[in-house]
């Protein structure tokens, strides 16, 4: 009786593992295919363009904007320096706050970020110089407005219409975290957010991607 029970348990575990790894493989295949298929936005008829940038740390992508392009909807941001550029990154709140380096990554944080729909944060980093690895993107005034609206709508605002700063958390002396809207999951990652922003701005990008390279390869 005990032997039969143990066999049933092992068979159940085997099925669970097969389903788990099967999901991972299917997810990666679909993600790779979608990351390599580009959108087909309409061409701009304007003649004046603004330069923005998309950067990555090798895993996570940010949208970087010259500070003079920001409108009044960003006036409640709290700067630590006198920056010329602001990098906006959206992501899992627990991952952001509890994993300043990859050495701080825990199993529970990784599982929550990938498999559970979790709360999010906006990470705003200040820069004074252009990084040579940033990808430059030229957009017109309509595209800029769409992009700004998308980023603004990713912030949570309080009753005073101000962004909600997450205090006591920072990676250094040039970045700040804010409460964000939306939930993070394997279907909507930090790079999916950047990809969605490019779509809203009518910039050529992947039809869907959870990867940073899926965004950058089409720009």
Image (cartoon, rainbow, N blue to C red):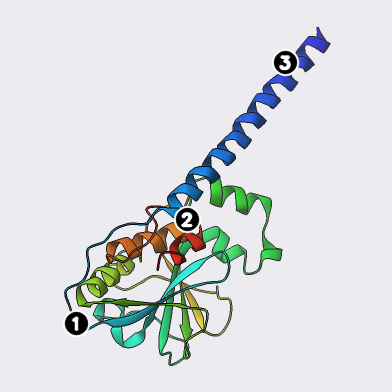
- Per the image, the residue denoted by label 3 is 8
Residue 14, by quadrant, is top right
Please tell me how crowded label 1 is: few (under 14), some (14-19), or many (20+) other residues with Cα within 10 Å. few
Helix, strand or loop status at disc 2: loop
Measured as percent of width and height from the top left, residue 68 is found at 31, 88
The residue at the far top in this view is 1
Q: What residue is at 77 percent from the left and 15 percent from the top?
A: 7
Helix, strand or loop status at disc 3: helix
- Per the image, the residue denoted by label 1 is 47
N-terminal label among 1 and 2: 1
Helix, strand or loop status at disc 1: loop
**Are the residues flagged by discs 1 and 2 in contact, CB closer than 8 Å?**
no
Q: CA distance from mark 2 to mark 3?
A: 37 Å
Of residues 172 and 85, the one nearer the viewer is 85
Measured as percent of width and height from the top left, residue 49 is found at 25, 82
- Per the image, the residue denoted by label 2 is 189
The residue at the far left in this view is 45
Please tell me how crowded label 3 is: few (under 14), some (14-19), or many (20+) other residues with Cα within 10 Å. few
Q: CA distance from mark 1 to mark 2?
A: 34 Å
């Amino acid at each position: 009786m005990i032997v039969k029970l143990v066999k049933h348990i092992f068979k159940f575990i085997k099925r669970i593992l097969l389903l788990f790894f099967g999901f991972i493989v299917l997810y990666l295949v679909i993600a790779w295919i979608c990351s390599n298929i580009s959108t087909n936005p309409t061409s701009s008829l304007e003649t004046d363009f603004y330069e923005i940038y998309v950067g990555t740390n090798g895993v996570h992508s940010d949208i970087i904007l010259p500070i003079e392009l920001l409108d009044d909807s960003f006036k409640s941001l709290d700067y630590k320096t006198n920056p010329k550029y602001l990098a906006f990154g959206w992501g899992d709140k627990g991952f952001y706050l509890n994993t300043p380096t990859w050495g701080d990554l825990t199993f529970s944080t990784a599982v929550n970020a990938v498999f559970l729909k979790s709360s999010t944060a906006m990470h705003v980093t200040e820069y004074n110089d252009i990084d040579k690895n940033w990808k430059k993107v030229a957009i017109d005034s309509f595209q800029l407005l769409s992009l700004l609206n998308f980023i603004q709508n990713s912030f949570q605002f309080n009753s005073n219409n101000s962004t909600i700063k997450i205090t006591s958390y920072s990676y250094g002396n040039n970045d700040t975290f804010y409460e964000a809207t939306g939930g993070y999951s394997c279907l909507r990652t930090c790079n999916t957010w950047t990809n969605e922003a490019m779509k809203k701005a009518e910039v050529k990008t992947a039809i869907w991607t959870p990867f940073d390279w899926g965004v950058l390869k089409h720009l």
